Amino acid sequence: MGKRKIFVKTDLSVPQVEHSRDSVGAVFVLPEALPPTNTNVDFGRNPTGSRNYDFASWYGVGIDSITYACQRQIERYLAKQDSEIEPSTVASICKGGLNHFLNFATLRATALERELVLGDINRSLVDDFLGHLAGLGIATLSQRSHYTSAKSILNA
């Protein structure tokens, strides 16, 4: 007897990043989507002490489109849309690497005196982020952990 294909039901209400492409093909977030009405992401019950993460402090500091994309990706992880990541892992991604990355992006936007957009996330920015982590004076293992957490969001 043959195997039966089992289809997984998909929730179509999963958050999507409201984006468009310009004439060069670069992706940008639609301005009317920023900031979203709900900036708080709820992890639900999980083994960590973290139950939610609020992105409100990252809006209005020069990295709105990056913050918006990160928030939507966290929501997609929690909806089990992109991969099977447990809520406790998502909580540690937010509290660890994402905090440091958004802090660094805020510093970069302030230094450049302009808004950072998704197109600004490139190899140079990631290398500078690694240098920023090294400059914090934390252990190499902690630097690696923070970078890996931030990378999981940026890759997605």
Image (cartoon, helix red, strand yellow):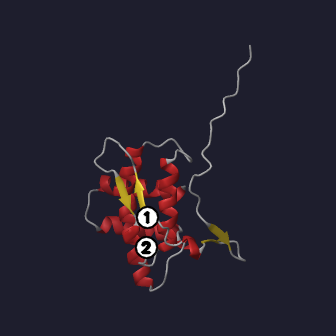
Identify the residue at horizontal 41%, vertical 49% (top origin). Answer: 90
Q: Secondary structure at mark 1?
A: loop
Kindly identify the amino acid type of the residue bearing the numbered disc 1.
Answer: Thr
Kindly identify the amino acid type of the residue bearing the numbered disc 2.
Answer: Tyr
Q: Quadrant of residue 96?
A: bottom left
Label number found at residue 139: none
Identify the residue at horizontal 45%, vertical 64% (top origin). Answer: 38
Q: Is 54 above or below relative to 29?
A: above
Q: Residues within 10 Å of mark 2 (few under 14, many from 20)?
A: some
Image quadrant occupied by the C terminus? bottom right
**Camera-side residue: 119 or 40?**
40
Q: Secondary structure at mark 2?
A: loop
Give the labeled residue for mark 2.
Answer: 59
Q: Quadrant of residue 149?
A: bottom left
Q: Position of residue 48 (x, y in %)?
A: 30, 45
> Residue farthest to the bottom?
113
Q: Position of residue 66 (x, y in %)?
A: 50, 69
Give the labeled residue for mark 1.
Answer: 39
Q: Are marks 1 and 2 in contact (CB under 8 Å)?
A: yes
Q: Position of residue 40 (x, y in %)?
A: 41, 60
Q: Nearer the viewer, mark 1 or mark 2?
A: 1
Judge from the rendering whether residue 134 lies leftward or rightward of residue 21; answer left or right: left
Identify the residue at horizontal 34%, vertical 65% (top origin). Answer: 133
Identify the residue at horizontal 69%, vertical 76% (top origin). Answer: 22
